Amino acid sequence: MSSASQEYQPYLQPGGFKNWFFSVDHKRIGLMYLYSILIFFLIAGLCAMAVRAELLFPNANHQIFDHHGYNIMFTLHGAIMVFLFIVPGIPATLGNFLLPIMIGAKDVAFPRLNILSYWIYVVGAIAVVWSLIGPLPSIENGLIKFPANWLDTGWTFYTPYSIQSSAGVIPVTLGAFILGFASILTGLNFVVTIHKFRAPGMTWHRLPLFVWALYSASLIQILATPIIGITLALLIMERVLEIGFFSAALGGDPILFENFFWFYSHPVVYIMILPAMGVVAEILPVFAKKPIFGYRAIAYSSLAIALVSFFVWGHHLFVSGMSYWSRWIFSLLTFAVAIPTAIKVFNWISTLYKGSIRMDTPMLYACGFIFLFTIAGLTGLPLATLSTDVFLHDTYFVVAHFHYTMQGGTVVALVGGLYFWWPKIYGRMYNETVGKIGFWMLFLGFNAAFMPQFILGYMGMPRRYADYLGEFAELHFASSLGAFINGLAYVVIFGNLLWAAKRGKVASKNPFNSLSLEWTVPSPPPLTNFDEVPTVTTWTYGYGEEQNA
């Protein structure tokens, strides 16, 4: 692989708001996405802390707000976290920043389309925030009272309630509709870039596995996102024009909304998790100093997951009255998606076997991901099994499983990826000790928060309830304490990164001795990435092959 630019002009050179907001440089767009989603991560996280504070004690001893306020808080937590943070998450941030450099390109295929996708994201976010503008909450009898027009449907906007409830449904669903266009444009840009802009010698079987993961997720973005856009548009039309799509009173079918919603929303899980798997596949061989085990199996399993993800939405509707054979088929297909996932986990662990392992902060997150996501996968099996899903459906078992997938998977991998590539992004090193402290706070706090929820679900505690019986009190109290530790961990984690961006020790070009192409350019990278398009002659994961030759 050839090295990068001789005339070094970093993309981080001084520039005002206009120079950044109108920039077509993929690295700047990736950073703008990063700080935008982190703002919404903070808002959604504070909503989660409020929910767990409310659930500290049972028997209608309201700590913060009443039942209506509780519904609003968990709705805002879910809607903001899913649509404004996790869905754009890794692809729009690390993907935008790294994809062109990792394949030897100077930018994405459509730079102007790239900045347009960010502007669309901003417009969609404003539409979501617009739903909160109006009468502000007040305090009555020591409790926060929310206005009736605040959104309280849950992040799924299930009909018929979302047709009849507060006016806040329209701006939020309109915002989610707009955000879908940003997702589609990003996916389209990535697919074309990977097909057409790879450097000479960068064959499909030399592509970094992170690029394979982004490619697979992008295909889902392009094919699945229009479904949720149409569904939300129909919901808005039904509320405004009273056209009967989902309301039984108007001749519609509320179960149709659930089918449309989950036909998108289960594949979107893999838009979130496939790039996370790609991040882990990049970190493990670097810190194990071994070639990645089963490269082609990991690469093609990403495509297999993307394909099968379109056929498993029905397991969300096992108790909705679907036919006997439909339940069996969807159950079988849900088990099938575990096969390519298990292939990845097996190959990651095999990569670690007999490796010369360094447990630096990025490696801690990669190993933490494997542990947490394995729990997520194994606890998904009872939800795919017809007999046990009937018992566990809509209980806290589902809440725990979902968070082990989303936070234990996607968010942990995003943080691990930030720690891995932060020296490349900013050219400065973070504090390694603080980085490890942040990881262990997150790992312990997360498990303390959500492991009790598996037990709560098994005991029959329903999700989305603002109150609960005394028999659930101890586990809820433990879960809330764990959640507070989990939230505090992110202060340490991102505080360390932000400190490093300004005051950290200057990093070398390749502090982790990686063989991937992005580490051949200076830190931070030049504006154009490369003076000349490099020629790739070696495999990205050839660690130790020189010594073994």
Image (cartoon, rainbow, N blue to C red):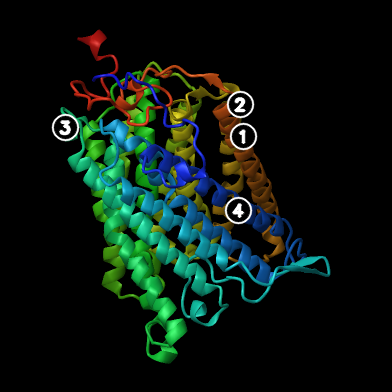
Q: Residue at x 49, y 39 (%)?
A: 412
Of labels 2 and 1, earlier in sequence is 2
Q: From the viewer's perspective, is the residue at label 2 or at label 1 nearer?
A: 1
Q: Amino acid at mark 3?
A: Thr
Q: Marks 2 and 1, how far apart in space?
A: 9 Å
Does the residue at mark 4 contact the one at mark 1 (Cβ under 8 Å)?
no
Does the residue at mark 3 contact the one at mark 2 (Cβ under 8 Å)?
no
Of labels 1 and 3, earlier in sequence is 3
Of labels 4 and 3, earlier in sequence is 4
Q: Which residue is mark 2?
A: 434
Q: Quadrant of the C terminus?
A: top left
Q: Quadrant of the N terminus?
A: top left
Q: Marks 3 and 2, how far apart in space?
A: 39 Å
Image disc number at residue 495? 1
Would residue 461 be seen by someone viewing this image from the given angle? Answer: no
Q: Secondary structure at mark 4?
A: helix
Q: Marks 4 and 3, how far apart in space?
A: 42 Å
Q: Which residue is mark 3?
A: 203
- Looking at this view, is 475 or 102 the one in front? 102
Q: Marks 2 and 4, how far apart in space?
A: 24 Å
Q: Secondary structure at mark 1?
A: helix
Image disc number at residue 43? 4
Q: Position of residue 474 (x, y in %)?
A: 70, 53
Of labels 3 and 2, earlier in sequence is 3
Q: Marks 4 and 1, how far apart in space?
A: 16 Å
Would residue 232 be seen by someone viewing this image from the given angle? Answer: yes
Q: Amino acid at mark 1?
A: Gly
From what the image shows, is residue 71 above or below residue 365?
Answer: below
Q: Position of residue 87 (x, y in %)?
A: 42, 53
